[in-house]
Amino acid sequence: MNKTKDRAWFAVFTVPLLFIFTTVVIIPFIIGIFYSFVTWDGIPANPKVFVGVDNYIQIFKDQRFMASAWHTVKFTVLALLSVNVLGLVFSLLVTSKLRVSNAARTMFFMPNLIGGLILGYIWQFLFTDAMEFVGDKTGLHHVFFNWLLNPQFALYAMVIVFTWQMAGYTMIIYIAGIQGIPDEMIEAAKVDGANLWQRITRIIFPLLMPAFTICLFMTLSGAFKIYDVNLSLTKGGPNNATEMFAMNIFNEIFGYGRYGLGQAKAIVFFLVVAILTLTQVAITKKREVQM
Amino acid sequence: MKKASRALFEVLLVVLALAFLSPIYIMVVNSFKNRAELYESALALPHSISFQYYAQAMAKMDFFTAFLNSLTITVTSVAIVVVLASMTAWMLARTEHKLSKFIFMVFVATMLIPFQTIMMPLMQVMDWIRTHLHIPMLNTRGGLIYMNIGFHASMAVFLYHGFVKSIPVALEEAATLDGCSKFGLFWKIVFPMLTTITVTIAILDVMAMWNDYLLPSLVLSDKSLRTIPLSTFYFFGEFTIVWNLAMAGLTLTIIPVVVFYVFAQKYIIKGIAAGAVK
């Protein structure tokens, strides 16, 4: 009696969300695996032809896809570095008990609230117009030109925009980490004659490892899955030079109507993201120290 | 000497923060300029303030409709996520059997799935529901809300689960002995204790849903249903080169975000730090 009643309550509390979650995430994920083994153009009346692992073999012969994977890797490495270095510098600056540090913290975080799509458009203007203008005024045309038209610099432009978006976010997490370090520890090190650099590298960094774990995870997965900024800033151009993983998948499916091939790419994308983030978390977690 | 160097440091920090926000300054000043003025100097202040480009952008973007759509979709989705996820997570955390462990595991594991991996099959499932069960999931606000809930379920359950685990059960047991039903127990005793994490989850989800472009772009096709990111996208498709008008449009889209930030700033910053530590 009591047991069935408990079961009924269990169902009342969990089934609504489980139902929605299953129809939105679980079922699509499972049938997504099936779609990756067929060729289909997305038109319901047309048959889905089973082709086995053909799609997966195709992927590796797809030059444009491999190029997009390479852009994504390059972008992610650069973004990982710049976001975290800047976020860490900001956090160290604003935790240094100054009157203006609260205001500065608020300002550094601000861009993170603006959606990726809109950020991309703002910077499109900065690169096409403001940069040209500065170039004209200063004569430094080799630095201040429209980066978005240059295949190599367009990728750096994306790194800048992503950094602008994410640095404030990682700053918040690093601040939480820094504030978790007891003041006495820093004071004791000072008394023992440790200089600023030693205090940062020997005490602050090791104790910040949990914050590193999270921030690297957030930036790694965020950079790898980037789509909005990519779409609004460069549309993948010039000449597909900034087409990332996520955009390539979208174009394959909804642009060219190669549903099966696109879905196989999507599955590969999932595997890469999962392996990469799990490995990173495992590595940084191992280096965390207990206080 | 020490005081002087400190003041210098403060000034430097303010300058750095202002430089960091200069893209926003450039966006705003150019939203007031006419084309000739804009090409004269992209960085200078405008000669005069006129809101004509704002009026134009507002009309072309259907700003109020988009704003209301974004607001309705975000608020409803977040409210339902909070209610359903807290109920689910509490049950999962307070029952010891294998099923609840398994369900929790599934929620956590699926957090690794990128949206791009399920976007196409998701559209197929929603289309199937539309044609076979006659429930309009595509091109409706309700459908988008439903999918928002599904996508934000994992993270919310994960955060609530961790938080519930840290609360002692004694209070809940006492209420049960007093004859409180599970439903009453949850809403009167447990949910109020979850306020901190509820605020965190609500803020993270508001930011994610308000700014989301990809899912709404796949689900909503009617012009009248467009959210702010969607209407910005279409606006740019049509008016790219008219930069002053474009800047007015972008400034408009940022105003709600800034207002939200001013009011919720403390909670946003706390929420992100708390959400990350879990």
Image: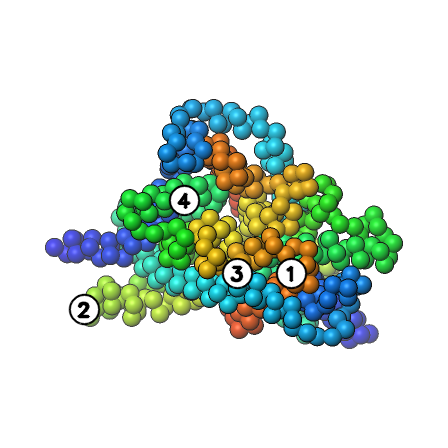
Reading the image, the residue beneath label 1 is: B246
Q: Judge whether B156 appears above or below B114 on screen.
A: below
B277 sits to left or right of B190: right
- Residue at x 60%, y 65% (from the top left corner): B57
Q: B142 or B40, which lies in front?
A: B40
In front of the other: label 3 or label 2?
3
Question: Residue A37's image quarter?
Answer: top left
- Please tell me whether mark 2 sits on a helix, a strand or a loop: loop
The chain identifier of the residue carrying mark 1 reads: B
- Residue at x 65%, y 55% (from the top left corner): B240
- Please tell me whether mark 1 sits on a helix, a strand or a loop: helix
- Residue at x 64%, y 50% (from the top left corner): A233
Q: A83 or B132, which lies in front?
A: B132
Reading the image, the residue beneath label 4 is: B123
C-alpha gap between disc 1 and disc 3: 14 Å
Q: Residue B228 carries which label?
A: 3
Q: Judge whether A100 appears above or below A2 on screen.
A: below
In front of the other: label 1 or label 3?
1
> Is residue B277 in view from this perspective?
no
B187 sits to left or right of A51: left
C-alpha gap between disc 4 and disc 2: 46 Å
Q: Which mark is residue B179?
A: 2
Identify the mark nearer the N-term, 4 or 2: 4
Instruction: Same chain for labels 1 and 3? Say yes or no.
Output: yes
Q: Which amino acid does label 2 sit on?
A: Gly
Q: Residue A96 location in percent, x, y?
A: 68, 67
Q: Which amino acid does label 3 sit on?
A: Ile
